[in-house]
């Protein structure tokens, strides 16, 4: 897995608009997932965003977003595809949608 992380692209995410996460936060994501995530099984190539911290006693989101900013319990995820060597973002269909500026 170390080789995968070293060869895969690395991304950083910052908030542009809204208050879903702290404005000064820089989220660092590598091929395994969010660096320093507290989520169980957080090295599964996924990074989950949503307003729920726990469900059934397990941490379900890597990034906990402000529910007042209309974030669903599990809003979207970013996934690394090792075969295509790129990241994908998928809205989970429960909430106000997901907008990306690259």
Image (tube, grey):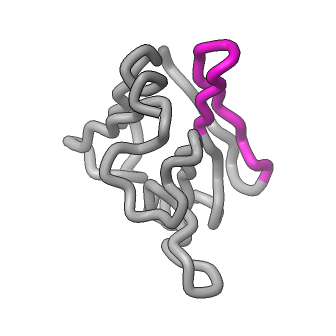
Q: Quadrant of residue 58?
A: bottom right
- 77 or 46, which is in the foreground? 46
Q: Return the x and y of residue 55 as percentages of the image width and height.
A: 62, 79
Residue positioned most to the bottom: 57
Q: Please tell me whether residue 87 belongs to the stretch shown in magenta.
A: yes
Q: Please tell me whether residue 64 belongs to the stretch shown in magenta.
A: no
Is residue 34 shown above or below 8?
below
Q: Quadrant of residue 79?
A: top right
State which region is magenta.
78-93
59 on left or right of 34: right
**What residue is at 20 percent from the left and 42 percent from the top?**
24
**What residue is at 41 percent from the left and 44 percent from the top?**
34
Q: Return the x and y of residue 94 as percentages of the image width and height.
A: 76, 56
Q: Return the x and y of residue 75 as percentages of the image width and height.
A: 64, 53
Q: How many marks?
A: 0
Q: Return the x and y of residue 99 as percentages of the image width and height.
A: 59, 31
**What residue is at 34 percent from the left and 27 percent from the top?**
12
SS majority, magenta: strand
93 on left or right of 86: right
Residue positioned most to the left: 24
Is residue 63 shown above or below 25?
below
Residue positioned most to the right: 93
Q: Quadrant of residue 85?
A: top right
């Amino acid at each position: 897995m170390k080789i995968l992380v070293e060869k895969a692209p690395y991304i950083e995410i910052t908030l542009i608009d809204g208050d879903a996460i702290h404005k000064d936060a820089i989220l660092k994501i590598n091929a395994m997932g969010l660096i320093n995530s507290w989520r169980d099984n957080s090295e599964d190539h996924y990074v989950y965003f949503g307003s729920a911290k726990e469900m059934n006693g397990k941490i379900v989101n890597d990034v906990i977003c402000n529910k007042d900013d209309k974030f669903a319990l599990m809003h979207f995820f970013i996934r690394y595809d090792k075969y295509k060597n790129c990241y994908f973002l998928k809205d989970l269909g429960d909430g106000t949608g997901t907008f990306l500026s690259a």
